[in-house]
Amino acid sequence: MPAIFSKIKKESSENTRQWDLLITQLMQGNVIPVIGPEFLVDDEKGSNPHQILIDDLAEAYEIDSHPKSFSELLYDKGFDASDRKNIYAMLGDAFSQPLFKPSQLLKRLLASKRFPFVITTSFTPVVEDAMREIWGADALRVMKFTNDPSHNDDISTRSDINKPTVYYMFGKVCRSEKKYVVTDYDMLSFCRAWLSSAERPQNLAAELQSKYLLILGNGYSDWLSRFVCFSLKPRIDSHPIGLVVDPFGEDSFLQFMKRIDAFTLRDAEEVVSKIESLLTERENEQQQTRFNMPLQGTDVFISYSRADAGVVAKLYDTLTSKGLNVWYDRNNISYGGNFMNEIIAGIKSTRLFLPVMTQNIARQSNEYHPYRTEWKTAIDMASGYGRTFIIPVSERDFDFYGSDIPDALKACNAYLYDSDQPDFNELADNILQLLSRI
């Protein structure tokens, strides 16, 4: 095969691998978009609200040239220190009312609700407005980095990544200078803080390290783009960035990203359309297979009392929404089969066993139930492993460690949930990380 066609074939295969990785990570809830100004609006003056603001300020100050950055405007056009400080207040006042509508491309990207946690590198509230439109104003949480360790927002637990959130990486517009990035000097100061282990938001930084980032439309210069990437992932050599989409990115930066195994593209419209089509395809495949009978080789086996069918259905839905293959006896028992033999075969071939513990278990202590046989099988299996095999899922109101369940189950760390508002997203994320090491 001629060399030119071999190269085309190789690139096509690599793109297929990268797209498959992106969609797999997306289905598992591991993708976090990092959205910059080049992706935000469909304004008659352009698609970058920062440049629109620069042009309007230049006109207001009767500057005939066309500065391409706030730094060029504020430092190269005769502004003194007082004028520069006043610009922050002017921007803050300007955004006291809505100035820009989110672009259709931005809303299409977020419409799937597969991106609950979104980072924006723009100080404008455009991403926040789009998220409010999609998730609802009451559901959305707004967090920001202000370059002040005493006021920088941070997530509390890993499950916070699953809650609808906009995080302003470089501050949100307000009347005060140094609280958000406008000039190159501001950017260097914020990047320095992000790179400092003492100043960056510790929990968020730790969580970002293992996430697949979808970096869209930031349009920075080569070296500034590298600083931003290292701010997000200091150990970039061992944890690849993800997908970088930058129509204006310098070739040297994109080549650098490719060398560290990032997926790089330039056409944002193409990327959003591809995500939409592949996500629909994968969701349809999952819907068709989730109620099949994977009798063996599952990721997770759920053991439960029929009295807890409601909460277990929610647990099942959460796990399968992350792409996990789950044994759930509502779906996994064949008609006319020997159900106990099928259950035991399912336990012996699964990777993790999740017994669901509630007050119903205590109430049923004098009754026969198959889940006790399931426990015994799992306990026997666990004794042969040198790793975690059993993860009890316990209602907080159930006295897990003081109950009459087998001591071998009490010896396992239980995941506790609130019976009135069961949320299994953190559990699902922990399982995904655990399975990645098995």
Image (cartoon, grey):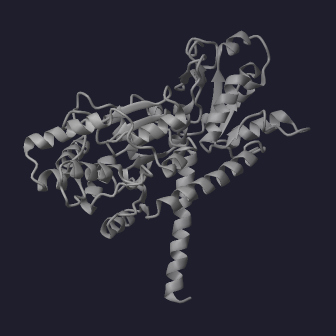
Closest to the observer, 344 or 141: 141
On the image, the x and y values in percent for residue 269 come to 51, 59
Q: Is residue 316 above or below residue 51?
A: above
Q: Is residue 392 above or below residue 132?
A: above
Q: Is residue 228 left or right of residue 84?
A: right
> Residue 120 lies in what quarter of the image?
top left
Q: Is residue 274 left or right of residue 193?
A: right
Q: Is residue 398 left or right of residue 71?
A: right
- Residue visible at 60% across and 38% down in the picture: 384
Camera sees residue 257: yes
Closest to the observer, 438 or 204: 204
Q: Is residue 407 above or below residue 228?
A: above
On the image, the x and y values in percent for residue 232 come to 33, 47
On the image, the x and y values in percent for residue 390 come to 59, 32
> Residue 415 lies in what quarter of the image?
top right
Q: Residue furthest right?
A: 336
- Residue visible at 54% across and 24% down in the picture: 414
Quadrant of image for the N terminus? bottom right
Closest to the observer, 305 or 204: 204
Camera sees residue 198: no
On the image, the x and y values in percent for residue 64 come to 19, 59
